[in-house]
Image (spheres, rainbow, N blue to C red):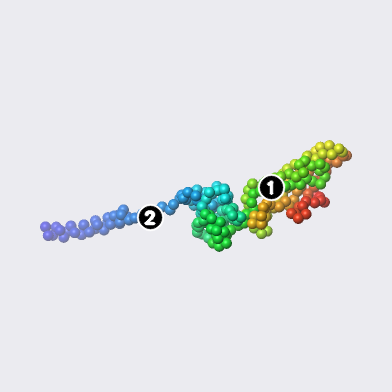
Amino acid sequence: MKNSSLFLLPGFLALMLATMPAFAAATATTPPAPATQLPDGQCDITTNGLVQPACAAAITSTVSYNGVRSDPGLAAVPIDMWNFCRYLDNASGNSIFVPLRSETEWQAFVAHAPIALSHCSRPSSALTVPPGFNCPSPQPAKQTVSEPDYYRWSAGSSATFKTSTTFKCSSDATGSWTQNAEAIFSGTDADKGDPSWTLTDVTYTGGADEKGVAYPTCHIKCNPFSGCNPPCTQ
């Protein structure tokens, strides 16, 4: 029996050594999987963000969020609260949380943000296009147009949008006719006030004089100081 015990001991040790890795693996604490769902009142503002829910629309005072998460990448929508409109474009390589519980929190983040912040051009429903100078008795006197979207804005940027509208023109000599107007607006910094769009160009077509000669296409430049003035350029 003494010799038999000595013989079995090496086999027992070999069995223990062979099963210890599996035993250790079975009893080790498995780290929890990273969270994929944000708490209520928060959303991920990054295009193709890492967690849910995604911020589906611009974060404004009418949307009840107490904070947003910014992952590496460009922001899908802006934050427009307490007179500061910003896109959170995160090139830091890290995810950050942006508190929005108060004006103080948001303005402090804007002042000391660890990531790039792009300014905005806000939507507007109060933009106007004037009629062409060769449109007698225009109806309406001005056309109101709207731009429903936010745009990134930066100095020297070319954020623009185009829109088309019409005017009804009439005179005893020519009767009634329709003038077509294609307008171009340029985005401005929303921090400077609303509307954050400036009319820069209008092209008019349509109509004819009393002899039936079609009016030429009329392209005019506009600015916020002197408005839109002739002469036309082709």
Q: Can you give x and y, in whole percent of width and height, for residue 58 in the image?
A: 58, 50
Residue found 64% across the figure and 49% down from its top: 123
- Location of mark 1 (residue): 126
Residue 137, above or below 87: above
Q: Is residue 170 left or right of 53 when viewed as pictured?
A: right
Q: Quadrant of residue 179?
A: top right
Q: Is residue 27 left or right of 100 when viewed as pictured?
A: left
Q: Can you give x and y, in whole percent of width and height, for residue 16 in the image?
A: 24, 57
Residue found 71% across the figure and 52% down from its top: 198
Label 1, label 2: how far apart the Cα atoms are: 55 Å
Mark 1 vs 2: CB contact within 8 A = no
Residue found 78% across the figure and 45% down from its top: 131
- Location of mark 2 (residue): 31
Q: Is residue 28 left or right of 132 when viewed as pictured?
A: left
Residue furthest to the right in view is: 211
Q: Can you give x and y, in whole percent of width and height, for residue 156 in the image?
A: 68, 58
Q: Can you give x and y, in whole percent of width and height, for residue 174 in the image?
A: 85, 38
- Secondary structure category for the residue under label 2: loop
Q: Is residue 77 left or right of 131 when viewed as pictured?
A: left
- Mark yes or no: residue 124 visible: yes
Q: Of 198 and 1, which appears nearest the observer?
A: 198
Q: Of 64 and 217, which appears nearest the observer?
A: 64
